[in-house]
Amino acid sequence: MAKHNLKKGSEMKNREFTAVAATSLSRPDLNGQCFTVGALEQLAEQSKDARVTYNFDPHFIIGKVVSGEIDGDKLIVKFKLTSEFNKFLKAHPEIKLNAPVPYYIVPSYTVIESKQIKECQVHSKVKLANFGLTNKPADTNISPIMGG
């Protein structure tokens, strides 16, 4: 597994990071959720300028998505951290982004259409709310943040 590149400091602002944020039917996530490729395409279309929060907390907006695109059955997201990221880290010294724990960016969304197929609840139509920076993703098929 590749090591993430999130570090403290002003040098993080406006640097671009990339991650696989979601995958389709390859395997359900830890909550039994799956996306169709069409649902991933919807997330990609809706992702530009979406907020990135820390652990989905709307009080901690730390970045903004630059783009989302589909590569096979994967949603690839590029994002930049904002100056709020440094303020956030100063206010929360207990958070250690330099630790050997990888971080991920994952979507928060509302399900519009979905159906049960075997052990998976398959989402075919979704509306993106935002993205969350987390070290505990439900989708174990995604990759940690790279770049910077």
Image (spheres, grey):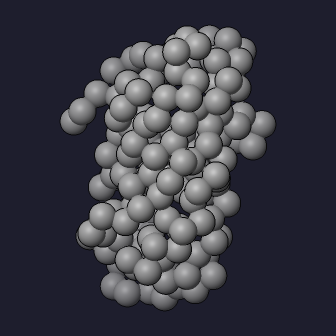
Q: Is 113 rendered above or below residue 137?
A: below
- Residue 21 location (% of width, % of height): 42, 53
- Residue 72 location (% of width, % of height): 27, 69
Identity of the residue drawn at 41% across and 62% down: 69
Q: Is 9 rendered above or below residue 72?
A: above
Q: Quadrant of residue 116?
A: bottom left
Q: Does residue 137 appear to the left or right of 141 in the view shown?
A: right
Residue 51 makes an appearance in the image: yes
Give 56 or 10, whichever is nearer the viewer: 10
Identity of the residue drawn at 36% across and 32% down: 147
Residue at the limit of the structure toward the left, as seen here: 1
- Which quadrant of the rendered structure holds the N terminus? top left
- Residue 47 location (% of width, % of height): 57, 59
- Which quadrant of the rendered structure holds the C terminus? top left
Give 31 or 93, whichever is nearer the viewer: 93
Figure disc tally: 0
Give 148 or 55, whichever is nearer the viewer: 148
Residue 54 makes an appearance in the image: no
- Residue 118 location (% of width, % of height): 33, 85
Identity of the residue drawn at 46% across and 63% down: 31
Q: Does residue 87 appear to the left or right of 122 in the view shown?
A: right
Identity of the residue drawn at 49% across and 88% down: 115
